[in-house]
Image (cartoon, rainbow, N blue to C red):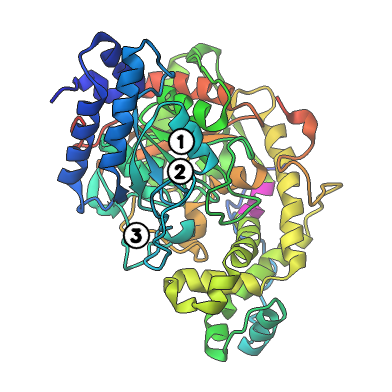
Amino acid sequence: MSTTPEASDSIAALQRAYESGTAEPHAVTQTAFRAIDAQEPALNAWTARDETGALAACADRERERDLGYVRGPLHAVPIAIKDLMHVRGLATTYGSPVHDNAPAPEDARLVRRLRDAGAILLGKTNCLEYGYGIAHPDVGQTHNPWNPQRTAGGSSGGSAAAVAVGQAWGATGTDSGGSIRIPAAYCGIVGVKPTYGLVPLDGVQPLSWSLDHAGPLARSCADAAVLLSAMAARSMQPVPRKPRDLKLAVIREHAEDPDLEPEVGRVLESALDALASAGATIVRVSISALRHADDALMNVIAPEASVVHAGRLERAPESFAEDTRKQLETGFAIPAVAHVRAQRYRRYLGERLLAALGDADALVGPTVPWTAREWNPPLDDPTGAAEMRYIGPYNLTGLPALSLPCGLAGDGLPIGLQAAGRPHGDDALLSVAAGLEGVFGTFRPPRFTTA
Amino acid sequence: MTGNTDGNQGSESTSRADLDATVVQAMATSAGLRLDARRAALIAPFVSDALAADAALAQLDMGDSASAGAPWGRDEHDT
């Protein structure tokens, strides 16, 4: 194996290994594919692998480095792309067994930015059907690297598992109701939903236009910042904040939610205690308007998703998984007035969240009420709504939010802490999260093997 | 700021009217989706929930919040 354990652990360490000559892109990428081979199809994280294309790109990056040209921190870094995004030359399958097998003629813009930044695209990762909460039974869900009997979460589960298990140094995801942050929490990695509009979505399959976001999944905040910088075409160089300089506002409606499993609550409070011991100021805030967030999210996402998929639902409704089909049909029966009222609530809630944030550095709480379960619940049942309860408010309001691992539950599964910041304060939020990460440490699944 | 002491973050106590499948069928049809009675009956509970949630939201005084614009509210919050 040509890579060192250190090179497998962070993008910066991989770059150092490249610079020192202890690793080279071709061997690193081949090793990544062998790691994928060893864990597929058990993990079910990948829908397509492009070893030929990836190794050709490695040759280009090696030649560039030989000429003294390094594109940046993503030069020759192997990454994965969620299969809701077009990658030139590969079919986009959307987590559906029924799709056009024609290769995409162009990259999605965010994919092109990653490619131009030097990243090596290993292939496409599995996701829930059209990102709408359900794994199509003919495709299957991605399994959790910490416990294969559990889900990796969704909808960006393939991306999260591939990163957590060390097959890729980072991955892309989309997030309309938690689809980056839920799998990040379940798999023990960092997932960032940036400010609404920061990352372009052309070439990305929509689910709900006014809620859709794209962002990175990575093994650290620093790696996430490198990926997000390229995706957003905006330089982000977060410097970890000192815990003693941080003021964090814990949302009581989330941290004290009756649906929060006691073990998750215990680990969250331990994490907050650790931050307080390190000098952070922890305050508790209450936002009563959050009581409407579950319902408002559904009254936005359901009609928008139904319009997105109207044509196929009319032509071939049986091609959708039954639960996806029911969600799409439901959206057609929601009146326009309900959608507009929910849209109005979003701005009302945004004002309340920002008022609660006040002079604190971030709003914090649990990411999900529980650790990974066996299956992903449908969005329109109470369990599905509860799974999105803490994360949905930031899809509604567009505020940047991320999940980072803060500890392990008694069953050995990771638990995510969510932090959210001000609009366009993505860099500042990553600086806060990097400070928290320094207290919590990083987490690797037992099956993790160096790529 | 008032606290939400009951911890219930689902819809408020607005009573839910269970919609008949034929009503749901008509609502979907009016929005452009042909739905048979069996499919309408399957989704009727979810549509009823959505309308109950909307009724609860209608009780919330949202002041001068608009239905369009930056999703976080007023632009002066931008960093």
- Residue type marked 2: Gly
Circle 1 chain: A
Where is residue B11 drawn, in percent x and y?
A: 64, 61
For label 1, the residue is A216
Are the residues flagged by discs 2 and 3 in contact, CB closer than 8 Å? no
- Name the one closer to the observer, A71 or B53: A71
Which portion, as a residue range, is magenta?
Answer: A289-293
What's the CA distance linking mark 2 and mark 3?
19 Å
Circle 3 chain: A
Where is residue A303 drawn, in percent x and y?
A: 64, 65
- Residue type marked 3: Trp
Upstream in sequence: badge 2 or badge 3: 2
For label 3, the residue is A375
Q: Is any part of residue A446 visible from this angle?
A: yes
Name the main secondary structure of what is drawn in magenta. Answer: helix
Disc 1 secondary structure class: strand
State the residue at coordinates (24%, 37%): A445
Q: Is B10 located above or below residue A166 in the figure?
A: below
How many numbered marks are there?
A: 3
